[in-house]
C-alpha cells in the first residue's frame, strides 16, 4: 500500500489518509498509517532498521484526509504542544443525511466513552469522565434527490476540541448523521469509509516557525456534485 504524500521535508511527513487504514495502535500483522509510512521512508531513503515517526494527531479508520506525522522527536514535541494549545486550525468536510435547519452555528456537548459498544455518546457535564466537545459548522451545499430520497448536505466543520469520534457523534446527535457512518445512526451507504474528510490544516512549521496550510483533495468516490 502507498500513501499519498501532501508534504515532506526532514521534519514532517503529511499524508492524505485513505479510508479503512487505522492511524496506529493495531496488531503487528495489521497495516496502519504508521507502519506504511515507515516502510515508505525506509524504501525511499534506503534506511535499514527502525525509522522514527511520531503521530501527533489521529484520524478514525474510516475517515480520510490530512494527517500530520513528525519525523523527529523535536518536531513531535513541538507539534504536540501546538495541538494541545489549540493553535492548529483543522477544517473537515462532512456529507450528512438531510438538510440542517441552521446554515451555520456551533455545537456543544459533553461526551463519554461507551467501552462496551466501543463508541462515544453524549452525556451531561456532571457525569463521570465527561469530556467537553465543541465545533463550528457551516452548510455549504445541499442536494435534493427525490428519486432515491437521498437528500444530503455538505457541511464544513471546524474543530474547537479534539475528542474521539467527536464530529461523528455530535453531528448525529444534532440529527444529521454522516453518510455511511452506521455506528452513529446513518442509514445511507457510502462507497468507501464514511463521508468525513480532513480537508484543511493550518499550523506553524515546528522548526522553521513559518505558517503552513495543507489541503487534501476530496476522494474521487465522493458525489461529483460535491466535488465540483
Image: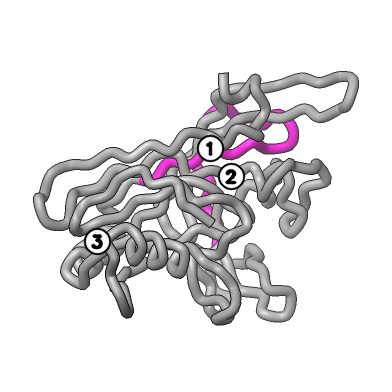
Instruction: Pick the residue in front: 13 or 56.
Output: 13
Residue drawn at (46%, 52%), measured in percent from left and top? 3
Relative to 41, 210 lies left or right: left
Residue 220 is marked as none
Residue 92 pos. (x, y %): 48, 41
Residue drawn at (77%, 27%), measured in percent from left and top? 151
* 21 is within the stretch colored magenta: no
Toward the left, the furthest residue is 208
Toward the right, the furthest residue is 147
Does residue 174 show up? no
Q: Are marks 2 and 1 in contact (CB under 8 Å)?
A: yes
Say which residue label 1 marks. 93
The tag earlier along the polypeptide, 2 or 3, is 3
The answer to whether residue 87 is above or below residue 53 is above
Residue 79 is marked as 3
What coloring was used for the rendering? one colour
Instruction: State the SS at label 1.
Output: strand
Instruction: State the SS at label 3.
Output: helix
Q: CA distance from mark 1 to mark 3?
A: 23 Å
Q: Quadrant of residue 122?
A: bottom right
The tag earlier along the polypeptide, 2 or 1, is 1
Residue range corresponding to the magenta coloring: 90-110
Query: Neighbour class for label 2 at 10 Å: few (<14), some, many (≥20)?
Result: many
Does residue 225 show up? yes
The answer to whether residue 165 is above or below residue 77 is above
Instruction: State the SS at label 2.
Output: strand
Instruction: Pick the residue in front: 193 or 163.
Output: 193
Residue drawn at (35%, 55%), measured in percent from left and top? 68
Q: Main secondary structure of the magenta part?
A: strand
Query: Neighbour class for label 3 at 10 Å: few (<14), some, many (≥20)?
Result: many
Amino acid at each position: 500500500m502507498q500513501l499519498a504524500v501532501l508534504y515532506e521535508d526532514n521534519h514532517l511527513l503529511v499524508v492524505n489518509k485513505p479510508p479503512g487504514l487505522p492511524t496506529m495502535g493495531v496488531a503487528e500483522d495489521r497495516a496502519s498509517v504508521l507502519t506504511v509510512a515507515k516502510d515508505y521512508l525506509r524504501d525511499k531513503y534506503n534506511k535499514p532498521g527502525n525509522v522514527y515517526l511520531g503521530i501527533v494527531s489521529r484520524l478514525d479508520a474510516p475517515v480520510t484526509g490530512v494527517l500530520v506525522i513528525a519525523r523527529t522527536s523535536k518536531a513531535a514535541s513541538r507539534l504536540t504542544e501546538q495541538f494541545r494549545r489549540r493553535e492548529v486550525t483543522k477544517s473537515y468536510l462532512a456529507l450528512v443525511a438531510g438538510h440542517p435547519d441552521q446554515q451555520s452555528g456551533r455545537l456543544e456537548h459533553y461526551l463519554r466513552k461507551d467501552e462496551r459498544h466501543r463508541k462515544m455518546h453524549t452525556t451531561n457535564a456532571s457525569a463521570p469522565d465527561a469530556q467537553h466537545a465543541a465545533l463550528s459548522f457551516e452548510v455549504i451545499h445541499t442536494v435534493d434527490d427525490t428519486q432515491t430520497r437521498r437528500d444530503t448536505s455538505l457541511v464544513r466543520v471546524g474543530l474547537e476540541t479534539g475528542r474521539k469520534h467527536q464530529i461523528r457523534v455530535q453531528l448525529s446527535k444534532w440529527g444529521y448523521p454522516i453518510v455511511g457512518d452506521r455506528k452513529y445512526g446513518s442509514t445511507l451507504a457510502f462507497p468507501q469509509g464514511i463521508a468525513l474528510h480532513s480537508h484543511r490544516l493550518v499550523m506553524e512549521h515546528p522548526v522553521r516557525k513559518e505558517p503552513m496550510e495543507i489541503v487534501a483533495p476530496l476522494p474521487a468516490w465522493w458525489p461529483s456534485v460535491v466535488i465540483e
